[in-house]
Image: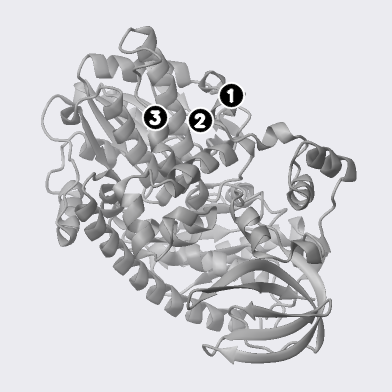
Amino acid sequence: MSGAPRLQVRDVPPRTAFALEQAGVHPLLARLFAARGVRSAAELDDTLAQLLPPTALHGCAAAARLLADAIDHGRRIVVVADYDCDGATACAVALRGLQMLGAASAQLSYVVPDRQLHGYGLTPTIVDLACGDDAGGAAGDAAGQSEQAASAPPQPRGGSAQGRLLVTVDNGIASIAGVAHARARGIDVLVTDHHLPALVDDAVVLPDANVIVNPNQPDCSFESKALAGVGVMFYVLLATRAELRTRGRFDAATQPRLDALLDLVALGTVADVVRLDANNRRLVAQGLKRIRAGRMQPGVAALFHVAARRAERASAFDFGFALGPRLNAAGRLADMTLGIECLLTDDPTRAAELAAELDRINRERRDVEAGMREQAELLMEQIMPSGTPPAALALFHEGFHEGVVGIVAGRMKDRLHRPTFVFAVGADGHLKGSGRSIAGFHLRDALDLISKRHPGLLLKFGGHSMAAGCTIARADFETLAGAFRAVAQEWLSPASLARVLATDGPLALEWFNTQTVAALEAQVWGQGFEAPTFCDEVDVVQQRLVGEKHLKLRVRHAGTLRDAIWFGHAEPVPERVRLAYRVSIDEFQGQQRLQMVVEAAG
């Protein structure tokens, strides 16, 4: 149902590549970096000294004063988390960091919404839960669900609600009603978020919080708009440390080392698939260096173990495809309390137990996803009997699980190269949809246009250019699907609907070695700074299926026989073919062999 992508070689500015090489950058890396927009070697400096300063992040200084006052006066601080990996790591960073800065453990607690019961963000219900007003409600459910892992989260109980400070992490910028409810109760609110603010009649509307820290709010000149939720919280902690330093709590020599939290910052940043600009790459690089040196939270180490990944060779790939999915699975199918507790515990044995439970839930998530993908394939065959997909897709089935719709939307988007929404029935009977998009189609803006054309159709919506969510009445699915297709037909040209795979051209023979693979794996690759994909003409000497769905190849490349594998592809390829591939090391029985991991043929 999807044609082969057109292979397009990235443009490499020759002067930039030469300048990078002259500055001491590996010749191959100089070419790769130049093709990804790096203009000087200074951009590759990943030391902490090169991080953008917290003073540039609007609201950070005010947030620091608010938190420093709360610590000084012993106020209860309740962190309101989100149920994805970014939210979980941001919650752990907030609680660990505040304790490092002097907050007593009795001052600190957190709440995390249940995806199906509460929905997203700081709602009035979550405000009441954070104040301990609902002992038999969501807080009790969270503790009960985590009994299977013999853990209960720190729950806010007792004391005056007015004495509390709510700190949102990875949410809150669109929580107009929730913040208003908290303020009406006399509760202070600090919003730390990175999502786009709400729009009403094309005007930005911000919640009436005491302080908002968000690089994407109006009047914020912070250069890294791609900062993840966990990155925002880390910056708030840096500013709070500076504020406490001015108050004489400690000096530069005795201040707590917040860089100990960078393993969590790196994990959340990559898992949230934010663009890895220079500042985010520094945060991730620093986290990876610490993990490779064995310096990480026990929960992170335990997640590496259950995922069968080697921490001493940690890469951004591990965050995005091994650790992140195991944490996200808790928020999708169970309770993100499990994930947060795994990241908070200092007991390696406890961390191992929680990581094992997260691994089990992730296997369950895979089974659920497999069934949903199979059903989605059947739905697509009905929608496009000719094999040609429409400009955009909206899919719904009674058996879909709300917690997995985003993953399935992403899989379908990747397969068909079309903006895709997948819907499931929520606990309230409404349809909850999660969408994923392609380049050139801003998903949140598309929903905004649909809301204007069809007033009342979208009960809730929000998100980013590439990922968004919405809620609709069950009876309105076909209306939404048609409206979504109509916007896509207007906005997307035939060229933008054609799949294109950007490659880095041929890999010179001198770089076909394990040292090159090691040099590539040592770098930080990810969203907006994609890992290298090369392309070359090869002769296929042998091809066979392994594991029933992977194509194993023996190819002749420039006179040399090489191993290649194409995961998830069962169709044979021509004897002479142009392959787009990554290079990796295949380890078997203690032996290392270089192999080409095929991404496409064209």
Q: Amino acid at mark 2?
A: Asn
Q: Work out whether 262 lies above or below 366.
A: above
For marks 2 and 1 on the same chain, the one whose residue lies earlier in the sequence? 2
Who's the residue at 53% across and 21% down the image?
Answer: 58
For the question of whether residue 59 can be seen, the reply is yes
**Residue receiving disc 2:** 214
Residue visible at 39% across and 37% down?
261
Please give the residue where the numbered disc 1 appears in the rendered image. Answer: 220
| Secondary structure under the numbered disc 3 in the rendered image | helix
**Where residue 555 appears, x then y in whole percent?**
74, 83
Placement of the N terminus among the 4 image quadrants: bottom right
Relative depth, front residue between 501 and 564: 564
Towards the viewer: 386 or 221: 221
Q: Position of residue 477 (x, y in %)?
A: 51, 66
Q: Which residue is mark 3?
A: 258
Q: Residue furthest front?
A: 590
In the image, is 82 to the left or to the right of 498?
Answer: left
In-image side of 100 versus 223 (left or right): left
* Other residues around mark 3 within 10 Å, as few (<14) / some (14–19) / many (≥20): some
Q: CA distance from mark 1 to mark 3?
A: 24 Å
State the quadrant of the C terminus: bottom right
